[in-house]
Structure formats: structure tokens, C-alpha cells
Amino acid sequence: MTRPTVVAIPGSTRQKSVNHSLIKAITELTAQRLEITVYDGLGRLPQFNPDDDQENVAANVSDFRQLLREADGILICTPEYARGVPGTLKNAIDWTISSGEFPHKPTLLITASTDGTFGHRALMETLKAIEAKNIDNLQLVIQHAKTKISNENRITDESTRHAVEELLDRFVWTIQNS
């Protein structure tokens, strides 16, 4: 049996961010159940402009959309910037609105930041608006993430690890029952 495919989108463009470490930890935790591909192109996507969202859309936008379309699920791990959604992440999501890669696609959102509640809430509203599947049951805020996720890609806090594992079980179930 083939493993379901998931595109992981780190909301941070920093390669050594807590969210990149979290994605690596999740990849290890789900190695037997999911095939995760990390999309690291957020910073290279052009600024969203509806006038540019025509037949000849930029190649990297087209590639991003195709990657999402072919995936069985989407995983977003993001920090909160200035009590909001990182601009590059919101920009990437904006590029999918007219082409419709998110509607009814199982989407898991983890906000791992110092606080995270403000950005998480805003991103939840966006994901609901674009009809990401089962988003209310597939979301988690990890506050003070730097104290719970190591640079060695491990979830070091036991209650956080347990919460992430439960969330991943729901995510896999949602993908398998879609």
C-alpha cells in the first residue's frame, strides 16, 4: 500500500527555524504512514496580483499549485509574525484562491511560536474561507515553541509531543477517509 502524500509548508523562510525543525520531527514521526515533501519556495513566489493570475502565471506559482493539487493533504507549520500570519505564507495561499487547491483538501495547521494565538486565529479564518477540509479538528498552537522543539528536530516536551501525535492520527484518518 502506498503512503499518502503530504506537502509541508513552513511559514518561516528561515531554514533553521523552529517550524522547519517541527516539520522534520513530524516527518520522522509519520515515516511509516505519510510521504512528506517540504515546499521551501515561499520566498521566491511573486507578490500576488490578480492581474497576473491569468493563463501565463509565473512558473513557480504554477509548480506550487501543481504540488498542492497532487498531494493527498497539506501540512502548514508556521510562526506568528507581529501577531499575524507571515506575509510569504499568506501570499502563497492567496495564489491558490482562484485555482482552488485547498477546498476539501485535508489541511493540518500548527502554529509554533512564542505566543501564536493571533496569527493562528487569522490563518484559521483564511483556511476556513478557502474550505480546507476538517481544519477545525486539525489545528494546534504550540506556545513557547523554542523551549519544546530542539534544533535536532525533536519535540522535547512530552505533552506537546502527545498533542502532535494525536493531531497526526486525526490528519492521517482524515486523509484516508477523504
Image (spheres, rainbow, N blue to C red):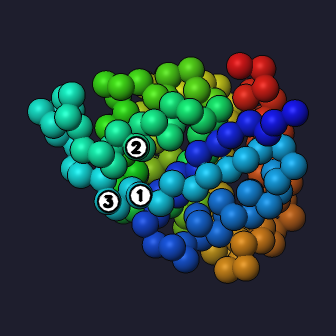
CB of mark 2 within 8 Å of CB of mark 1? yes
Q: Label 2 neighbourhood size at 10 Å, few (<14), some (14-19), many (20+)?
A: few
Residue found at x 67% / y 80%: 151
Q: Amino acid at mark 3?
A: Arg
Q: Look at the image and tell me in which quarter the N terminus lies.
A: top right
Q: Is residue 74 above or below residue 154?
A: above
**Dot 2 corresponds to which residue?**
63
Which of 49/124 is in front? Answer: 49
**Dot 1 corresponds to which residue?**
41
Q: Is residue 100 left or right of residue 56?
A: right
Q: Is residue 125 left or right of residue 75?
A: left
Instruction: Work out whether mark 3 precedes mark 2 in sequence or the reverse, and give the earlier one.
Output: 3
Q: Amino acid at mark 1?
A: Gly
Q: Is residue 66 above or below residue 47?
A: above
Residue found at x 56% / y 20%: 104
| Quadrant in the rendering for residue 64 | top left
Where does residue 122 sit, x and y in percent of width and height? 43, 41
